[in-house]
Amino acid sequence: MIVASWCTVTPGWYMALAAVLFVIGASGMLLRRNALVMFMSVELMLNAVNLSFVAAGRELNVIEGQVSVFFVMVVAAAEVVVGLAIIVMVFRRRSTASVDELSDLRG
Amino acid sequence: MENVLVSLVPLLPLGGAVVLLAFGKRLGEPWGGITATATVAASFGLALAAALGFLGGGAEPEIVTWFDWLPALGVRAELLWDPLAALMTLVVTGVGAVIHLYSIGYMEGDEGYGRFFAYMNLFAFSMLILVLANNFAVLFVGWELVGLCSYLLISFWFDRPTAAAAGKKAFVVNRVGDAGFLVALMLVFSTFGTLDFGRVFEAAPAELGTGLATAITILLLVGATGKSAQLPLYVWLPDAMEGPTPVSALIHAATMVTAGVYMVARTGALFDLAPVSAGVVAVVGAATAFYAATVALGQRDIKRVLAYSTISQLGYMFMAVGAAAYVAGLFHLLTHAFFKALLFLGAGSVIHALGGEQDMRRMGGLARRMPLTFGTMLVAWLAISGIPPFSGFWSKDEILAALFQRGGLWTVLWGVGLVTALITAYYMSRLMYLTFFGERHWSEGVHPHESPPVMALPLLVLGLGSLVGGLVNTTWRPALEHFLEPAFEGLTTATLPEGVTLLLLATISAAAGLAGIIAAADIYMRRKAAREEGPVWDLLRGGYRVDDLYARVFVDGGGALTRFAATTVDEKGVDGAVNGLARLTGWLGARMRPLQTGFVRSYGLVVLVGAVALLAWFLSRGVF
């Protein structure tokens, strides 16, 4: 167990920062209506996780943490391409990006 | 050497069938028919050569092994060449060849000429497999194959709805009998562990209890009643007359329908152990003989008279083998093959001459127009009526004498047989008088003519057989009995009375035949066509309405069952289950719909809560 202290930046700090970023992202995801902003929130959450991976990899002295991050970044990039395209198309068609108004699939 | 001969006997007709099926159309007329006739005739020659050893006496039965067929059951494709098989083979190939020859003329110009002879050859092969089998499995194969050929040939003119229906009827009714036969084979196998004739019959006296023997033999009898058209499974045979007449002669008179008689004789060792079953066989035979003879009285269609006559004569054979008079039964089988084939071919000749007319009311006075047909049919008529010295007299008399000699209740069967002999002579005389005597009743524009030589020659050959066929087993020279002796060695067989009793019995049975002929002459010769009207005649003509009864019980009953299965079981049960599942899914879906709110953010919340819950669960389990 690593004991955190105020003078050195231990991995615990990184973990804490990652948690904060994740919560910000999650809150944005749940509270904002604009699809674009929600999208940014998702990116934030992904990067929070990336941060925790890198920190953990560094701490445990293994390469897998960084490798995982690359995977996540590649997938996220691909997802952004598709997601943004969808949002642009939706906006063109309905002149809005508010997800609350996009509820055609309600049961 | 003999092995090869015996193997070739069934294989030649098979080869003919294959060639005709493949090239029948190209061979054309009359080469297709000649090919078929030649193969069967060659089989006859080979069988005769192979049987010479038995004729001389002293030759041992031979077993010809073809190949291992069902190693798991120890069943091999084997042929047995013994006197019984030899006799049957000679009858099948001899009469078969003659009828094939006749068919060349009869089927002239038919669209399915090649197909007809292919089926006929296939039938000859199947029947030979049946009679040459050395175990129950091969016997069963032959048994089913002849049934198939019978079906194919009855419905040969399949564009006639009646012919197609008759073929189906024959097939279905035979299946009923075959079911019993099959169960009998299973019982034999479970008891003896083998289906081999020799081993089963050898082990039977020691291993087979009376109860089991009775069960097996009764089931065998069920099979025999189907194939040999005995009560209660005879209904298919009269309808089988829808087929071409040579088929009626060969399959439904001379050979296939005698398979049941042959089978009972072959399994005599089992019937020997089950006196009850043997009695049942004889009673079924007697009942059938009498019943069918009475029905034959009322028929107007010339072929249907002969069909019921065949059923009746088969009843005689069953009486004989049931009374353990195997030789007498097979003797009658032999003579019947001659005279009944002749009667059918003669009837075919008449039908041919009248341009397809089968109703005897529109015949009459044909004797002078068709002297050869009339002459040969005269011989057959006297033979079936039991007039000495024609063949039928000897065999029928031997059966009746054997029944009489057994005494006790068997005397009743003798009485039934005697009365049936009288009725037989009566209805056959009626047929002859209506067809050949009296005034002409055929329609204008029909010019009866004698058949061509290719059809006349078979009539002459069979006429000769009907005339002198009885001499193979007379009282003073029982050649057939000596010939068949080895096949029934060790069985208790019926004996014949001797001296004055035999002579007296012979006189009585001949007198019965004569009485029938004279009685019929009194009615049909003097008063020309008797009126034959009223409820009794209708009942006889309709075969006691048995067909209606069967239609009501089995056809309607089966229909009701299938309707129940189709509507209640299938529509309500099977479909109900499937539809119910669909309704359940729909109902569940309706209940779950509100979960899909359409608000992306609430979905996100659910995902988050789920992830947190999962994480909490992992942590509490101590996975990390």
Image (spheres, rainbow, N blue to C red):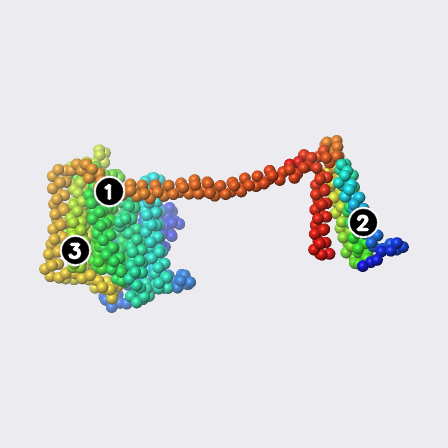
Chain ID, mark 3: B
Q: Position of residue B224 (x, y in %)?
A: 29, 53
Give the crowd class for mark 1: few <14, some 14-19, many >=20 residues within 10 Å. some
- The picture quadrant where one finds residue B185 is bottom left
Q: Residue at coordinates 32% horizontally, 57% vertically from top-left? A: B130
- Same-subunit check for callouts 2 and 1: no
Most foreground residue, A51 or B333: A51
Residue at 78% across / 53% down in the picture?
A: A53
The answer for which chain carries disc 1 is: B
Instruction: Give the residue pinned by disc 3.
Output: B411
Looking at the rendered structure, the secondary structure element under dot 1 is helix
Residue B58: give x, y in percent of width and height: 24, 68
Residues at circles 3 and 1 in contact by the CB criterion of under 8 Å: no
The correct choice, above or below, for B450 with respect to B400 in the image is above
Residue placed most toward the observer, B295 or B620: B620
Query: Which residue appears farthest toward the front when viewing the image?
Result: B620
Quadrant of image for the N terminus of chain B = bottom left
Identify residue type, mark 3: Thr
Badge 2 element = helix
